[in-house]
Image: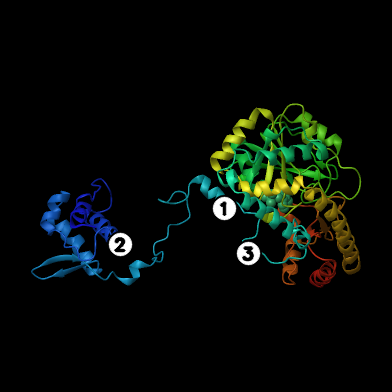
Amino acid sequence: MTKLSNALSLATITLDHASNTALYQQIYERLAEAILAGKLEAGLRLPSTRELAITLGVSRNTVVTAFDQLLAEGYLVAEVGSGTYVTYTLPEELLTARPLTNPQPQTFSAKRGLSKRGMLLALTPASISRKANRDFIFAHGIPALDEFPFDLWAKLETRRYRQAGRLFQYGEAGGYRPLREAIASYLKASRAVNCEPEQVIICSGSQQALDLVARLLLDTGDTVWLEDPGYLGARGAFQSAGAKVIPMPVDEEGLMIPPHYRGDVRLVYVTPSHQFPIGVTMSLARRLTLLGRVNAWIVEDDYDSEYRYTGRPIPALQGLDTEGKVIYLGTFSKVLFPALRVGYLVVPPAVVDAFTNAQALIHRGVSPILQATLTDFIHDGHLARHIRRMRVLYEERQAVFMDAAQRELGGFLELGVMDTGMHTVGWLPPDMNDTAMARRATTYDIETLPLSDYALQHLARGGLVLGYAAAKPEHIRQGMKRLANALL
Ligand SMILES: Cc1ncc(COP(=O)(O)O)c(C=O)c1O
């Protein structure tokens, strides 16, 4: 940098005379920043305080105070009779990040605090653990990762990387077209979902899809009906959007609408194929009642219906909807693996453009390479094969789980419905506190969430949510022994 441009840097210092920050402080900060950024070079002779005061339109004293501070902190050095220079040796500690000495409180009223929406996001509990992943034997919602064909996946992904081309650009709004087509035909054939590829919006897991739903369909104060106990991810997405969440009871036929409830609701969230976490399947009669009685958006979360062990799968609620009010939600977290972070929405035709635009605006979409790899995995028949294999495997693991539970905890823990999915509820004897029991289990390294964590209203009976898909049979047996030691 030349002497001339250094001088120009000084001339371009701008001061805010209306600011609450004192002028000497502003001069000090601007000069310190310029020195640290190298805009004012080491060894540069600064103009006299009088000249700089005239250039900046401030009193000489103001510049003198700023210079004194810069001299005291070692940014400048003064040579008697010669002038003031930018130091050759910057104070060491300024070249590294400084610790926070004046952190702001986490309130929305404080200056530089969180917004009201930010406070909601900060205080609504996130349903995934903040702890590093550990191998929890009965963690729910985790598939058999030891059985996933990761080598095959890596080959498919590498092939896509080698092809290069358009996949390395930003993807298409709404998602990679061939993947949307593959999902649409899969859902039509296997779940009787009514959909065209453009209705499929690819998201970063169903959690991001729920956020999109909340942003597009809910205003602050809107009422949302949620199954109770119910999915924390959905509760979190809606509460943090400012919605008023009303807990709705669940019985053996799924979500119940008490007779006195009026349809004064904006959105209903349900898990009809496999109620989360209780595990019941919503009866056809209840599905028809819900569609008939409620004039609101209905979000159908079909997160693990691929794994049905007994009985015929009931077609999706979305396929019964004739008014275009059901939003169908799916995920690859259970059929493939959660770290993939790919899920999808099937939205009614009237809101396709709104969802497509919003997804592109706030998220820009899931990695096209990943989406293309997933498409290949589906087209080459690997998805169907993997689901078939896992259905057999999970049924076997479920049998081991039931047998071990009977052996170790028979008469104490009553297992809930297990005809679908990858988890069940272990119902505790009446009046037993499930939170205390879950805490006891943790001390034996068994991570399980108490049912009451999922409930807004008091539960008549407590339970533990237990996954059985992820662990090998010998680990399930050992885990059940440890659980029995903890509970009995
Ligand atoms: C009810 C329900 N929906 C969706 C998911 C999956 O969420 P994601 O697709 O964000 O991984 C889960 C995972 O446990 C779940 O329990």
Instruction: Give coordinates of residue 360: x percent, y percent.
Output: 56, 39
**Nearest-to-viewer mark from 2 and 1:** 2
Residue visible at 82% across and 51% down? 385
Instruction: Give coordinates of residue 92: x percent, y percent.
Output: 33, 71
Instruction: Give coordinates of residue 289: x percent, y percent.
Output: 81, 32
- The circle drawn on residue 36 is 2
Going from the N terminus, do you reach mark 3 or mark 1 first? Answer: 1
Kindly indicate whether the residue at mark 1 contacts the one at mark 2 (C-beta within 8 angstroms): no
Query: With respect to residue 37, does 343 lie above or below?
Result: above
Taking the image as drawn, is residue 67 in sight? yes
Helix, strand or loop at mark 1: helix
Q: Quadrant of the N terminus?
A: bottom left
Taking the image as drawn, is residue 265 in sight? no
Q: Kindly indicate the quadrant of the structure image that contains residue 484.
A: bottom right
Confirm if mark 1 falls within 8 A of ligand 1: no
Query: With respect to residue 15, does 352 lie above or below?
Result: above
Going from the N terminus, do you reach mark 2 or mark 1 first? Answer: 2
Helix, strand or loop at mark 2: helix
Residue type highlighted by circle 2: Leu
- Residue linked to disc 3: 131
Q: CA distance from mark 3 to mark 2?
A: 38 Å
